[in-house]
Image (cartoon, helix red, strand yellow):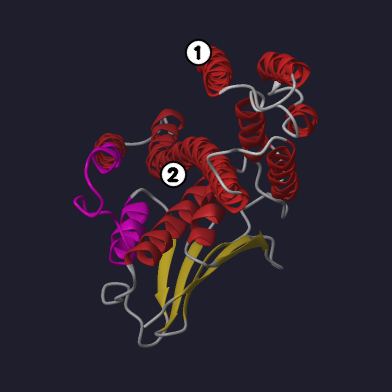
């Protein structure tokens, strides 16, 4: 709104200034002609002054009808000296607002009409060639000034458009970054707390329903609950510290921590076996950080789902590595006792988050039931050398 008002005010000031300039120039020419003496009949001088006055008034509509008014004023310059300044202002306006071909045609026409004026009313102090040369120089200057100003305005408009586009792009990138950060945080919270809380649920359920358990069994279950809660708080603090600290300042779990993860699940009562292929040791695998972390979260999610949907079934974690090619892993649980094979229930948020993790590092995730009624979760990750 303010920019539009300022632009309108500048246009009115420019129109007023050009009108005053054209009027003052016309009056000056009339006074000079009277001092020099009459060189044409009186009616021609009267027509000259009338045409000049009309040309000055036409400047107020130069923005709306620049080409039409320019043609009319160019024709008036065949006999009117006082209309020449207004005609040049209209030529400048056409150069500022209309295509170049229209400017060139009008400029050539204006030079020709001024030449006709020199023939009809010859200038005593200038020869015809000097007059034509002067007129050519003036028209070149007017047209060049108009074209340069138009180019400058177009450049400014282009820069403004680019600035607006850059601002919009920055806002979109910021929003996209925020969305990715929220999704990453959601994945971390789900993976970390889902795993720990599932351990808490199993041990708390065992403590609640096994009323015949001995005091030693109850103490052991309570100790596991306490340990799981402590680890959940620790993992939560790690996630928060990762959000607050610069990248790489906080160590995150990776492939070397998978053995500890399996051992923790086993201590909680799960039947989990870690199977390393020949020549593969999870404690010695040197893989990129992103791949290492993704593999850890994959095993963690697989064990969490197995505890949720098949708590009494044995689970096998197998890792296969081929340096320079790929790193594969699978978490397979057997069919839970007394339950038919079926897709595990739930919201699917964990698998969606895991699929996003795997996709980000260029891997592939598979999951589905096995022939024996269990469930398989597999992943294939790139392992560049």
Residue bearing the label numbered 2: 184
Location of residue 218 by image quarter: top left
Q: Secondary structure at mark 2?
A: helix
- Foreground of the two, 138 or 320: 138
Q: Secondary structure at mark 1?
A: helix
Q: Is residue 346 visible?
A: no
Above or below: residue 20 compared with residue 183: above
**Please, which residue is most extreme toward the left here?**
249
**Residue 225 percent location from the top left of the image:** 31, 36
Q: Is residue 10 visible?
A: yes
**Residue 90 percent location from the top left of the image:** 66, 30
> Within the magenta stretch, is there residue 248?
yes
**Residue 113 percent location from the top left of the image:** 74, 40
Instruction: Of the two numbered discs 2 and 1 on the same chain, state the one appearing first in sequence.
Output: 1
Q: For the magenta stretch, what is the residue range?
A: 239-267
> Within the magenta stretch, is there residue 317?
no
Predominant secondary structure, magenta span: helix
Above or below: residue 287 compared with residue 191: below
Residue bearing the label numbered 1: 2
């Amino acid at each position: 709104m303010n920019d539009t008002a300022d632009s309108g005010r500048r246009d009115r000031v420019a129109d007023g200034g050009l009108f005053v300039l054209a009027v003052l120039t016309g009056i000056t020419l009339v006074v000079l002609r009277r001092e020099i003496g009459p060189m044409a009949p009186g009616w021609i001088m009267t027509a000259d002054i009338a045409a000049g006055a009309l040309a000055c008034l036409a400047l107020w509509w130069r923005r709306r009808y620049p080409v039409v008014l320019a043609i009319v004023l160019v024709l008036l310059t065949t006999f009117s000296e006082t209309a020449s300044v207004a005609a040049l202002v209209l030529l400048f306006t056409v150069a500022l607002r209309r295509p170049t071909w229209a400017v060139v045609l009008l400029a050539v026409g204006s030079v020709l009409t001024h030449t006709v004026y020199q023939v009809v009313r010859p200038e005593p102090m200038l020869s015809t060639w000097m007059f034509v040369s002067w007129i050519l120089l003036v028209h070149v200057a007017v047209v060049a000034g108009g074209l340069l100003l138009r180019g400058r305005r177009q450049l400014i408009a282009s820069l403004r458009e680019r600035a607006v586009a850059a601002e919009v792009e920055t806002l979109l990138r910021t929003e996209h970054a925020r969305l990715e950060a929220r999704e990453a945080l959601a994945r971390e919270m789900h993976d970390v707390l889902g795993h720990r809380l599932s351990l808490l649920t199993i041990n708390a359920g065992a403590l609640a329903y096994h009323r015949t358990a001995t005091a030693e069994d109850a103490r052991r279950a309570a100790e596991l609950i306490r340990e799981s809660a402590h680890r959940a708080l620790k993992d939560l603090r790690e996630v928060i510290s990762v959000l607050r600290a610069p990248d790489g300042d906080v160590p995150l779990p990776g492939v070397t921590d998978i053995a500890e993860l399996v051992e923790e699940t086993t201590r909680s009562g799960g039947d989990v076996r870690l199977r390393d292929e020949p020549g593969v040791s999870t404690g010695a695998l040197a893989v990129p950080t992103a791949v290492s972390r993704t593999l850890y979260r994959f095993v963690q999610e697989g064990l969490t789902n197995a505890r949720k949907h098949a708590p009494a079934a044995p689970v096998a974690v197998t890792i296969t590595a081929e340096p320079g090619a790929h790193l594969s892993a699978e978490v397979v649980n057997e069919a839970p006792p007394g339950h038919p094979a079926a897709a595990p229930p739930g919201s699917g948020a964990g698998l969606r988050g895991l699929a996003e993790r795997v996709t980000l590092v260029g891997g592939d995730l598979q999951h589905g039931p096995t022939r024996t009624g269990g469930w398989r979760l597999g992943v294939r990750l790139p392992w560049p050398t």
